[in-house]
Image: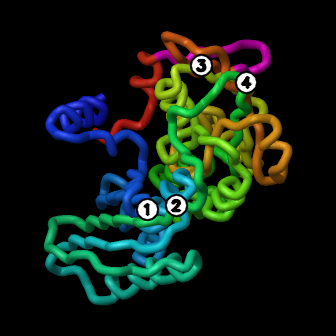
């Protein structure tokens, strides 16, 4: 995977790469988290299937999702916008209306950015959040017998992308999951308020299995989940049935659901609302060759490095 290769090159090129690894960097001398995401036209979005307003919302939300996974309270963003020469004023005003509305919902301020010319629309956002707990979240903190817990539902965003890309009819909820995701800020705040130690946590922006595998790898523990316990909406199942598709593939590998996935003790889970936080598995033994094990009831599947690299989202 070129992304992982490039990351290794970047780390080896820097005098200090200690901040690189998780989706957010924690600057302990300032007590803040920093993250940065970029959306590129015809790579991450199409102007034929979204609106400038929804694009503005999503550009902010994907960054807030990273802050949520860091158990951080979002505070500020900067916005860098690159556009073709003939971009209309209306596009910019609608884009920033979406950005502004999302910021208002989460009490965030836009504090600057940059504007440049480009062949295609590129939106690059840096988000800054304040530490909300004395404990940390990160991929490496999974422990044996931890429960694997998720928020929300899986597969809707990627099913929505499939529907839009193939001009298929689908429920509005599926399309909305793709075009206007919800960052799990409230759920993150609830979790941060009750944890009593560092916990393994990620958002599932690149897919459920992607998050599971990266936590498994970072913590040197295998993780086992029950696929029948993974929350998948009836709308996704119906869409897949009508179009002869496997909904479990969307849920496992699709990405862009922006749900939180974390590993925590049974005691902590007992303090959470089970209607919002769903347990889907457990952390297994410490393992020199960690993997993800998916239990389908009658069969199991082990996600090895080779399977992960073949099926996970590749930015290149």
Q: Which residue is mark 1?
A: 32
* Side (left or right) of 22 relative to 1: right
* Side (left or right) of 266 relative to 236: right
Q: Work out how far the residue at label 3 is from the one at label 1, CA to CA, in angstroms.
A: 31 Å
Estimate the x, y position of residue 76 in percent, counting from the top left: 42, 74
Q: Are marks 4 and 2 in contact (CB under 8 Å)?
A: no
Q: Work out how far the residue at label 4 is from the one at label 3, CA to CA, in angstroms.
A: 11 Å
The local crowd at label 2, few if under 14, some if 14 to 19, many if 20 or more residues have their Cα within 10 Å, is many
Q: Which residues are magenta?
A: 295-304
Residue at (29% x, 79% y) in the render? 112
The local crowd at label 3, few if under 14, some if 14 to 19, many if 20 or more residues have their Cα within 10 Å, is many
Quick one: SS at disc 3? strand
In the image, is residue 209 above or below residue 153? above
Mark before the other along the chain sequence, 3 or 1: 1
Quick one: SS at disc 4? loop
| Residue extending furthest toward the front | 29
Residue at (57% x, 20% y) in the render? 221
Q: Which residue is mark 4?
A: 145
Q: Are marks 2 and 1 in contact (CB under 8 Å)?
A: yes
Q: Which residue is mark 3?
A: 222
Front label number (4 vs 1):
1
What colour scheme does the image use?
rainbow
Estimate the x, y position of residue 114 in percent, counting from the top left: 22, 75
Residue at (55% x, 51% y) in the render? 69
Q: Work out how far the residue at label 4 is from the one at label 1, CA to CA, in angstroms.
A: 31 Å
């Amino acid at each position: 995977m070129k992304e992982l290769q490039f990351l290794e090159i970047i780390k080896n090129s820097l005098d200090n790469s200690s901040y690189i690894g998780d989706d957010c960097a924690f600057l302990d001398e300032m007590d803040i988290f920093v993250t940065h995401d970029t959306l590129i036209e015809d790579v991450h979005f199409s102007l034929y299937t979204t609106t400038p307003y929804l694009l503005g919302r999503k550009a902010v939300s994907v960054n807030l999702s990273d802050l949520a996974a860091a158990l951080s309270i979002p505070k500020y963003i900067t916005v860098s916008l690159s556009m073709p020469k003939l971009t209309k004023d209306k596009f910019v005003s609608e884009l920033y209306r979406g950005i502004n509305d999302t910021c208002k919902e989460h009490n965030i301020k836009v504090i600057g950015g940059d504007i440049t010319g480009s062949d295609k629309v590129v939106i690059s956002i840096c988000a800054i959040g304040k530490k909300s707990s004395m404990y940390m979240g990160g991929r490496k903190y999974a422990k044996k017998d931890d429960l694997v817990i998720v928020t929300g539902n899986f597969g809707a965003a990627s099913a929505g992308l499939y529907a839009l890309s193939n001009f298929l009819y689908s429920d509005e909820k599926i399309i909305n999951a793709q075009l206007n995701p919800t960052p799990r800020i409230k759920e993150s705040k609830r979790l941060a308020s009750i944890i009593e130690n560092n916990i393994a946590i990620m958002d599932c922006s690149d897919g459920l299995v992607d998050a599971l595998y990266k936590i498994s790898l970072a913590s040197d523990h295998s993780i086992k989940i029950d696929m029948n316990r993974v929350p998948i909406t009836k709308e996704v199942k119906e869409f897949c049935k009508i179009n002869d598709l496997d909904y479990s593939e969307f849920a496992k590998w699709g990405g862009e659901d922006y749900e939180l996935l974390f590993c925590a003790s049974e005691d902590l889970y007992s303090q959470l609302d089970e209607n919002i936080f769903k347990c889907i598995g457990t952390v297994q033994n410490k393992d020199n060759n960690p993997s993800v094990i998916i239990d389908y009831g009658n069969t199991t599947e082990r996600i090895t490095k080779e399977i992960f690299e073949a099926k996970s989202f590749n930015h290149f």
